[in-house]
Image (tube, rainbow, N blue to C red):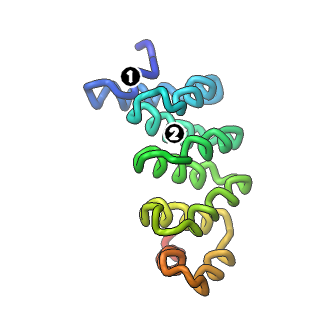
């Protein structure tokens, strides 16, 4: 099977899955193509699937690309970029994740919760405990929810 970025949005789910697996299996050699797929000129479906594949590959070098792609992104892309930052598990993602947790109500609660869970996995429970004292109700809520989930991570 020849793997192309377009196949990340193939009509058949099996082809999309096989394409994701091929990119993930290729590891580092697929990073340039997947990072290029994050560009706004690509279809949104391709962009969020590329973000997920990058996360599964797990190379911290893609953190800046995921952060950049998340700015102003739609829900699916932003969610997968933020999830990816946590999945990669590198401390260089902490400032971007903290900014999402501390964002105002314009951010999706799901995305903010995902960022808070990523912070926990990165050992940043102190910043979430600080969020419990935030005057912003949305920050308090996401910090509280993530800390309540901490025993299950």
15, above or below 66, in the image: above
The part of the image, by quadrant, that contains residue 63 is top right
Give coordinates of residue 17: x percent, y percent. Answer: 37, 32
Q: Name the residue located 43 percent from the left edge and 66 percent from the top edge.
A: 109
Q: Separation of disc 2 and disc 1 at Cα?
A: 14 Å
Q: Nearer the viewer, residue 90 or 151?
A: 90
The part of the image, by quadrant, that contains residue 134 is bottom right
The disc at residue 112 is none
In which quadrant will I find the N terminus? top left
From the image, tell me which residue sits under label 1. 7
The part of the image, by quadrant, that contains residue 86 is bottom right
Q: Residue furthest top?
A: 2
Residue 24 visible in the snapshot = no
Q: Name the residue located 56 percent from the left edge and 47 percent from the top edge.
A: 71
From the image, tell me which residue sits under label 2. 51
Q: Name the residue located 54 percent from the left edge and 41 percent from the top edge.
A: 56
Q: Nearer the viewer, residue 75 or 52?
A: 75
Give coordinates of residue 106: x percent, y percent. Answer: 46, 63
């Amino acid at each position: 099977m020849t793997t192309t970025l377009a196949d990340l949005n193939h009509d058949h789910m099996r082809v999309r899955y096989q394409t994701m697996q091929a990119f993930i299996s290729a590891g580092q050699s697929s990073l340039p193509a997947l990072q290029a797929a994050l560009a706004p000129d690509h279809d949104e479906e391709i962009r969020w699937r590329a973000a997920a594949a990058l996360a599964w590959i797990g190379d911290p070098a893609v953190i800046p690309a995921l952060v950049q792609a998340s700015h102003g992104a739609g829900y699916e892309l932003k969610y997968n970029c933020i999830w990816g930052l946590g999945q990669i598990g590198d401390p260089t993602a902490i400032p971007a994740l903290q900014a999402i947790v501390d964002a105002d109500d314009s951010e999706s609660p799901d995305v903010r919760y995902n960022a808070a869970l990523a912070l926990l996995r990165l050992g940043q429970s102190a910043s979430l405990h600080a969020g419990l004292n935030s005057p912003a109700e949305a920050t308090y809520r996401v910090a509280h929810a993530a800390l309540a989930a901490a025993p299950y991570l």
